[in-house]
Amino acid sequence: MSNYLDVLEKVEETGTRAWLVGDTVRMIEMGVQPDMITLAVDAQDMYQVANLLGTGTVDARGPYPALRGDILGVPFRAFGLRGATIEDDLSKRDLSIEAIAIRSDGGIVDPFGGRFDIRNRVIRITGDDVDLIDADPLRILRMLRFAAELEMDIFWKSDTDVRKFLELHADRMNDIPPERWGREIMKGIHRRPARFIELCDKYGMLPFFLKELDDLRRIPDGITEGRTLFDHVVTTLARIESRMDTNKLMQNDAFVLAGLFSRIGTTKLDGSDRTKAVDRLVNEYLTRWNIPSETIEEVIAIINGYKAFYEPMSERKFCEDVLAYSPDAVEIALEFAKCVANAEGFIEQFRDVLDNNKWNLMQVLRRFRAVSLQTEGASRYMTGREVMNLLHIKPGRRVGELLEGLDMAVGTGKVSSRAKAEEWLKAQPV
């Protein structure tokens, strides 16, 4: 922790008091190395602090302007105190485990017992639960998000107060703007999607932000007694969660969102009644949640296309898909198909096909990556201008067609070097 205290001392040399706060202190207490440190400073003018430090830039886009920069090689972000004292600032934080501060002398400020809660692995809303929830009901979702991500239990009083609030003031939840729901949901499903959704279901939160998912709890899967389509969604998310733990490629919003929305609007386990209207519903939800359009398109493509991987696919077909979408998108869709097969209990039926498809895809990706290695990062062996010079042709549609054909030749293993690319091009009619 000495490096962090050195940063505090450097800030305080400007005459501004500073504390380590929030996620930084929580991670230190949990024995985790923070990638960035969060500071609270006793100053409201972040521009002045930046000038005194001689480093950093001010981001004023959010409700609380943040100074972001680097001190002694440590990335940091600093916010002005919310209140007259550090205790006032901590009292405004959602959870006790985030309401801890460290002074530059190493002293701890922990007015709400956050360190005790960390040791006992419980999530507790800071201070007076009811007042904090009433001020911002979305704190309930943040409580569930942290409980899911950190695999902690919810403190009994917070549990009681949340349930009482939802019973008496459910209408308050409906007043929360969709984009705020979206931000918290995305954070909640990023690491532990299955546990997060199960907690949301436990507290009756699903109808507030995704009613169609809640509806699935009442639709039997038609195969296993007592099992519903909602159960399949949670099991699929659990498989996705497992893959994210072992494969960094899977840290992808579309991958998780596809699991969350995979059964929305359907009443059959095989999803054969899925329609374009369902795709529009998914698009409407994700748009309201402020999800980027390219991610939405990828989510819908995964849900509509993953079943293709249960049939044998040639290297040529994989090559076409990689060129039409992207290597990551195709690989994620294939992994999604595996997760669904596992969740629905028919993985053994399709294991060989899925494994063979994985092998074919890896061969295609290996060939495309070899191009980048041989050309110092270029995506093709030759540019359009080089093709025109080689074949003595003018700019036009034919150049594009030749480049697309060359991509297919590379992906299917017919071309593996620049020399072979030139040879292949010379053999084509112009």
Image (cartoon, rainbow, N blue to C red):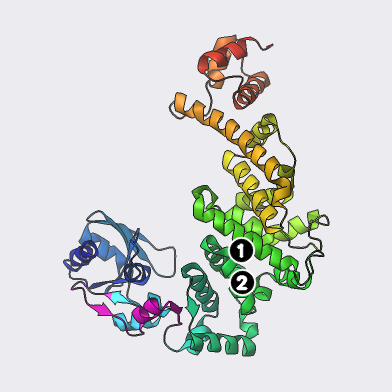
Q: The C terminus is located in which quarter?
A: top right
Can the viewer see residue 352? yes
Q: Amino acid at mark 2?
A: Glu
At x 61% / y 10%, what residue is drawn?
A: 426
What residue is rendered at 50% in x and 56% in y? 245
Question: Is 334 on the left or on the right of 36, as rendered?
Answer: right
Residue positioned most to the front = 348
User: Label 2 near label 1: C-beta < 8 Å?
Assistant: no
Q: Which residue is mark 1?
A: 289
Outermost residue on the left side: it is: 13
Locate residue 423: give its quadrant: top right
Q: Is residue 361 above or below residue 132?
A: above
Q: Residue 355 in the image: state x and y as whole percent.
A: 64, 41
Q: Residues within 10 Å of mark 2 (few under 14, many from 20)?
A: some
Q: Quadrant of residue 368?
A: top right
Where residue 80 appears, x then y in whole percent? 32, 72
Mark 2, residue position: 198
* Badge count: 2
| Element marked by disc 2 | helix
Q: Residue at x 54, y 66 (%)?
A: 188
Instruction: Give the side of residue 161 with respect to residue 34, left or right.
Output: right
Q: Which residues are magenta?
A: 102-126
